[in-house]
Image (cartoon, rainbow, N blue to C red):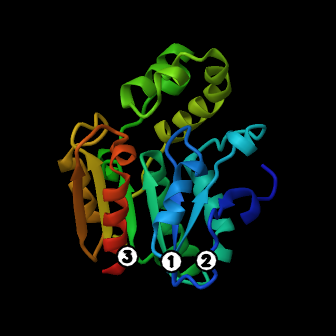
Amino acid sequence: MTAATARDWLRCYRPRPAARLRLVCFPYATGSATFYRSWAGALPEHVELVAVQYPGRLDRISEPCVPDMETMVDTVAGVLPPVLDRPVALFGHSMGAAIAFEVAHRLRARYGVDPVRLYVSGRPAPEYHENGVKHRGPDDVLWAELSRLGGTSAEVLDHADLRAALMPALRGDYRLIETYRPVPAQPLPCPITALLGDADPEVTPVQAGAWAGHTTAGLTLKVFPGNHFYLVDHRAAVLAEVVRGLES
């Protein structure tokens, strides 16, 4: 990989120079920074949203996907200093939640900076993580994952050209998360908010509640109606919960 820069990796859809803090958002597998574009204008004026754009999609589609979690976390932590001039919170959904969690630890180790809050959405606590081999399987098996998890329209699922365009990112992201091995670490000193849908096939309330063991500042557990992509249908309620956490 070439030298990473903030310009490559970070997207700020609504700059707010006077913002008191920043919310750094991490997309799910095959997701892009644009998933959070609509959040930027819905947050209070004192919060500036910055979304991470992984390689292998949209304007970075010609770039190879990141091969493993260690490389991803090291690279993201390396490009974040320009946004660390004010307090930051981290939000990640699904694969993005695991990345956000590891980045929180890396920021502490590398810069002595802790996020004011970590939001982990649609993701079990690290002790419930399971490795997998879907990234080694046929395209049809991987593509079926998008249907199983919801959040992808039938038009996209049935579109051969879109499938061809998305498959490298899908396989690369699954490789990253399925080969990820969480390393036991001291609990974070920031509070954690865990969010999930009550019909999410990827995480149960018990598994989400176990995030309590990864913070010394308390866990807030919020369950919404819906599947793995509950936060699409309940965007306003999710953002309200995010703001409550930031204000507290």
Q: Residue at x 31, y 48 (%)?
A: 124
Three-letter residue code for mark 1: Glu
Q: Is residue 135 above or below residue 91?
A: above
Label located before the other in sequence (2 or 1): 2
Tell me the tag on residue 45.
Answer: 1
Q: What residue is pinned by disc 3?
A: 246
Residue 150 x %, y %:
39, 31
Check contact, mark 2 vs mark 1: CB within 8 A. yes
Q: Residues within 10 Å of mark 2 (few under 14, many from 20)?
A: some
What is the secondary structure assignment of the residue under circle 3? helix
Q: Which mark is residue 16?
A: 2
Label 1 or label 3, whichever lies nearer to me, is 1
Q: Label 2 sits on what residue type?
A: Arg
Q: Which badge, 1 or 3, is on the more N-terminal residue? A: 1
Q: Residue furthest right?
A: 2
- Residue 212 in the image: x percent, y percent? 24, 64
Q: Residue at x 33, y 65 (%)?
A: 240
Q: CA gap, disc 1 to disc 3?
A: 13 Å
Residue placed most toward the observer, 208 or 12? 12
Q: Secondary structure at mark 2?
A: loop
Q: Residue furthest left?
A: 206
Neighbours of disc 3 within 10 Å: few (<14), some (14-19), many (20+): some
Q: Report if the CB atoms under discs 1 and 3 are less than 8 Å apart.
A: no
Q: Where residue 197 is drawn, which disc sits there?
A: none
The answer to whether 195 is drawn above or below residue 229 in the figure is below
Above or below, comparing residue 10 to residue 137 in the picture: below
Side of 247 where 88 appears, left or right: right
Q: Nearer the viewer, mark 3 or mark 2?
A: 2
Residue 206 shown left or right of residue 141 in the figure: left
